[in-house]
Image (cartoon, grey):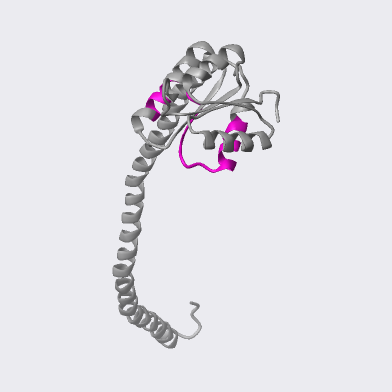
Amino acid sequence: MSAHNRVMFVDDEEGVRVSWDRMLTEYGFDVTTVTDGARAVSELEAHPMDVIVADWKMPVMDGLELLEWVRDEQPETRFILLTGYGDEAVERRARELGAYEYLNKPIGPETLAAIVTAAANLPQAPAAVDPEPAAEASAAERVVVPERESVEVEASEAVVADEPEESTSRLRSTAEIAGGIIVAPVLGLAFVIALPVIGFFAFAWYVGQLAWRALRPAGSSA
């Protein structure tokens, strides 16, 4: 348990105060209990607390009024508001006044002890956030995002530019295949027709050579 273990429990029901006093003491807290907000203020003026757990509906001074006083007079104190009457307007007001937590009854001892422990161990003066790095990050984001969009646009344009070339290539391939289908039979037919003609002329030339040799006068040279 940290040094910030002074807890005040504020509730107008004696049985509730006794029960929570015993439970929080077992968890190592130095507990003070009071019956309403007005008595809590008197005690807090003399003995400030690290954490206050207060019921909402109490006579003389209710939990929200006590929270408002704590915010103005002892803002370093963590305030937990309990209520058995769930009300969005009350919760919203508690958040506006800086309540550390708003809890609806009934609540288990372990849950409340865990929340009180977390509140007691929070640093009293959180480090301020430097706004300049955040501003620089925002500027960087503004620079990076257009570049990313530009790359996407260029890639899209490249795809569009490639489409006509791919279409032309496909058409050329189709035309070549169709031309091959048409030309191949024609070439085959021409070969079939030309082959006998060539053979005839070759045969005629051969017969002519034989006839010439047979009719050539004896002793003449070719």
> Does residue 42 lie above or below 155 as drawn?
above
On whether residue 32 falls in the magenta region, the answer is no
What residue appears at the point 44 percent right and 17 percent down from the top-left corner? 68
> Does residue 184 lie above or below 75 as drawn?
below
How many marks are shown on the rendered structure? 0
What residue appears at the point 51 percent right and 26 percent down from the top-left corner? 35
- Quarter assignment of residue 30: top right
Residue 134: x and y, percent? Answer: 51, 19
Residue 152: x and y, percent? Answer: 41, 36
> Does residue 83 lie above or below 214 as drawn?
above
Q: Is residue 25 left or right of residue 171?
A: right
Quarter holding the N terminus is: top right
Q: Is residue 124 left or right of residue 147?
A: right
Residue 9: x and y, percent? Answer: 55, 28
Viewer-proximal residue, 86 or 143?
86
Residue 205 appears in the figure: yes
Residue 216: x and y, percent? Answer: 43, 84
Residues rendered magenta in the picture: 91-118
Viewer-proximal residue, 210 or 192?
192
